[in-house]
Image (cartoon, rainbow, N blue to C red):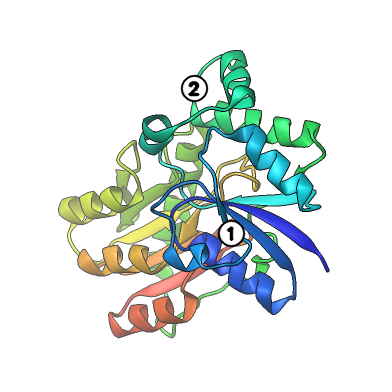
């Protein structure tokens, strides 16, 4: 039987992965990094909790269980990392060697350490390819020809924004960009776009040019739909093949009930 380890952060995404693994008869060994992970994950017989700084202990656990491939899924809030970190000797040595403490630096240092110990980090969409955005309109409601022009402008703006690593989401209306994502994140960008432009805006979210699928895949889920409904948006657009579309059936139903389109586009 195939075995996969999963390092679990916060949010629902790790749970979807575990459910999909069960369907495919894959044995999964989840490691929880925080007390705040989904409670259902803690109920797995193979579950084990580690502090995020116990790098050596995590690797030893995987190797003792014959695991040489893992995925890293879920949110890892930087505030929690440094507030709750307890380093083992390997974690201490790893941290000492880092040039800085940026999220990306930490992640790739951990990936390199796993690789040195014979453990491969798989893309986050491993087993989740059916969750990826496709190049189509999901809802019965579809954008008009004028709205397609606005979407095109939004895609160009979101791609330009992602190139400077400032954000991945823009809010558009009437062939104009009204809000760009910054440090505040996607949800607050959506709300700000609604405040500035009123209803019938279009939310466009794109991937980064060099998106590393092992550590970060952008996603649209039910909470994004709820934010869009709150500002009476007209639609949401995600990049096909590069982004996850979570809670798909529930999201489509809710969108159609609120006259909102959901669309994937190939860029």
Q: Are marks 1 and 2 in contact (CB under 8 Å)?
A: no
Q: Distance between the residues labelled 1 and 2?
A: 28 Å
Q: Residue at x 35, y 78 (%)?
A: 255
Q: Position of residue 231 (x, y in %)?
A: 21, 63
Q: Where is residue 110 in the image (x, y as percent from the top left)?
A: 64, 32
Q: Position of residue 123 (x, y in %)?
A: 69, 51
- For marks 1 and 2, the one nearer the N-term is 1
Q: Name the residue under label 1.
A: 47
Disc 1 is placed on an element classified as loop
| 7 on left or right of 221 | right
| 61 on left or right of 227 | right
Q: Position of residue 41 (x, y in %)?
A: 51, 64
Relative depth, front residue between 209 and 9:
9
Q: Mark 2 points at which residue?
A: 101
The image's mark for residue 133 is none
Disc 2 is placed on an element classified as loop
Which of the 4 image quadrants contains residue 18? bottom right
Depth check, mark 1 against mark 2: the one in front is 1
Q: Which residue is drawn at 43% across and 51% down?
A: 153
Q: Residue at x 68, y 35 (%)?
A: 111
Q: Which residue is drawn at 43% across and 35% down?
A: 81
Relative depth, front residue between 119 and 210:
119
């Amino acid at each position: 039987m195939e075995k996969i380890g999963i390092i679990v952060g916060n949010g629902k995404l790790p749970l979807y992965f575990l459910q999909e693994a069960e369907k495919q008869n894959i044995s999964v060994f989840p490691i929880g990094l925080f007390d705040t992970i989904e409670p259902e994950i803690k109920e797995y017989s193979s579950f084990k909790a580690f502090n995020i700084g116990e790098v050596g202990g995590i690797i030893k656990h995987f190797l003792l269980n014959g695991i040489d491939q893992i995925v890293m899924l879920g949110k890892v809030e930087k505030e929690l990392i440094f507030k709750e970190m307890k380093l083992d000797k390997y974690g201490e040595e790893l941290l000492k060697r880092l040039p800085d403490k940026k999220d990306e630096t930490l992640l790739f240092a951990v990936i390199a350490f796993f690789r040195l110990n014979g453990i491969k980090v798989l893309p986050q969409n491993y087993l989740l390819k059916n969750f990826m955005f496709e190049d189509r309109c999901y809802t019965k409601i579809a954008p008009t020809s004028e709205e397609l022009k606005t979407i095109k402008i939004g895609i160009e703006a979101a791609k330009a924004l992602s190139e400077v690593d400032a954000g991945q989401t823009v809010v558009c209306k009437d062939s104009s960009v009204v809000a760009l994502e910054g440090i505040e994140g996607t949800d607050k960008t959506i709300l700000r776009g609604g405040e500035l432009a009123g209803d019938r805006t279009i939310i466009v979210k794109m991937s980064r040019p060099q998106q590393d699928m092992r550590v970060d895949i952008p996603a649209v889920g039910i909470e994004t739909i709820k934010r869009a409904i709150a500002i009476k948006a007209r639609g949401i657009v995600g990049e096909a093949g590069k982004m996850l579309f979570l809670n798909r059936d529930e999201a489509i139903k809710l969108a159609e009930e609120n006259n909102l389109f959901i669309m994937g586009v190939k860029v």
